Amino acid sequence: MTLELAVAAALFVGVVAYALFGGADFGSGFYDLTAGGSRGGAELRTLVDHSIGPVWEANHVWLIYVLVMWWTGFPESFASAMNTLILPMLLALLGIVLRGAAFAFRKFAPTLGQARLYGAVFAGSSLITPYFLGAVAGGIASGRVPAEGRGDLWSSWLNPTSTFGGVIAVGTCALLAGVFLTADADRAGRASLAASLRRRTLGVGLVTGAVVFAALVPITHDAPTLAEGLRGRAAPLVVLSGLCGVATLVLLLRRRFAIARVTAVLAVAAVVSGWGVGQYPWLLVDELTLRDAAGADATLAGLLVVVGLAGVLVLPPLVYLFRLTQSEAWSEH
């Protein structure tokens, strides 16, 4: 394996991790937004706070990791992408900032009106951020980011591939969050809440699955290089995603919530990985390959050393944190 491919693989592991952990975090905003009024939605909003409270900051470690790996290992492509896609990136960043502030402030709001306002900002920005990150991915995958300079500031992310990318990102985030929240409610003995979340998650899963496969048609015309990759080397991942998505819905119907978490994670990981494998060997589709975009060998080797150190020093605490939050063990301390 070449250095640039190893670094790209390490970078994409971070993309998948952010899609999974950050995605489940963002997706909770959909259920917060649709929970109902102050009284009727109080139980669900309390569950959201309880579920994501310990991890919502930790999830952004993966975004920082991806950005640092990208601009260090493939600097020219990073500069071109940021120049071209600066507007959706700024909107995604704005969503992250507003979401975090609103999530913290609503717990200490002195009036019900202010708590509702902060809650609306939290829920709305939880949907905005994944949409614009998905739009960024669509702009890159459809070949609208040039190898040098700046592409069009508007058409680079206002196009069919970016639109479907954003909608799919929101849907997959909501599906992940729904599965995890349903399992949390069931584990806590809240049967009625688990049943309500189960119905909503089934609906989200059906709609998201339909959108994912419907997107293959416009992508064929708007992003032919990606479409060819999805029909070729990435086809097994597309099939795996569909099978895991169906399995998740069946497991939810059968109330096997713990196992459904595993299949939901596999479904989303397969979707994201399919995108990466489908556009390989392009970093900026039709413009710049991994080999041409890579930095100096010494830089790439240094990045791999840092990745190894992070795996030893950072990954175990994160694993332990998620283990605690996916059980009631933390409440024993």
Image (cartoon, rainbow, N blue to C red):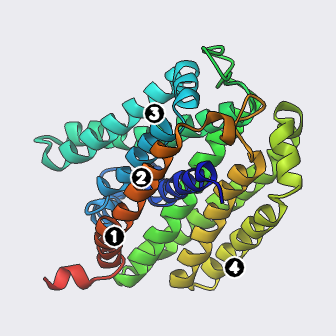
Q: Mark 1 points at which residue?
A: 312
Q: Nearer the viewer, residue 47 or 319?
A: 319
Q: Residue at x 62, y 34 (%)?
A: 293
Real-space CA distance between mark 2 and mark 1, rounded to the nearest whole angstrom = 15 Å
Residue 35 horizontal/vertical position (percent): 42, 55
Task: Answer above or below: position of 176 versus 329.
Answer: above
Q: Mark 3 points at which residue?
A: 92
For the residue labelled by badge 4, is the local secondary structure a helix, a strand or a loop? Answer: helix
Q: What residue type is labelled 1?
A: Val
In the image, 201: left or right of 23? right
Q: Which amino acid does label 4 sit on?
A: Val
In the image, 108: left or right of 121? left
Q: Which of marks 2 and 1 is nearer the N terminus?
A: 2
Q: Name the residue under label 4.
A: 250
Real-space CA distance between mark 4 and mark 1, rounded to the nearest whole angstrom = 37 Å
The crowding category of the residue bearing disc 2, from other C-alpha atoms within 10 Å (few below 14, some 14 to 19, many at least 20), is many
Quadrant where the N terminus is found in the figure: bottom right
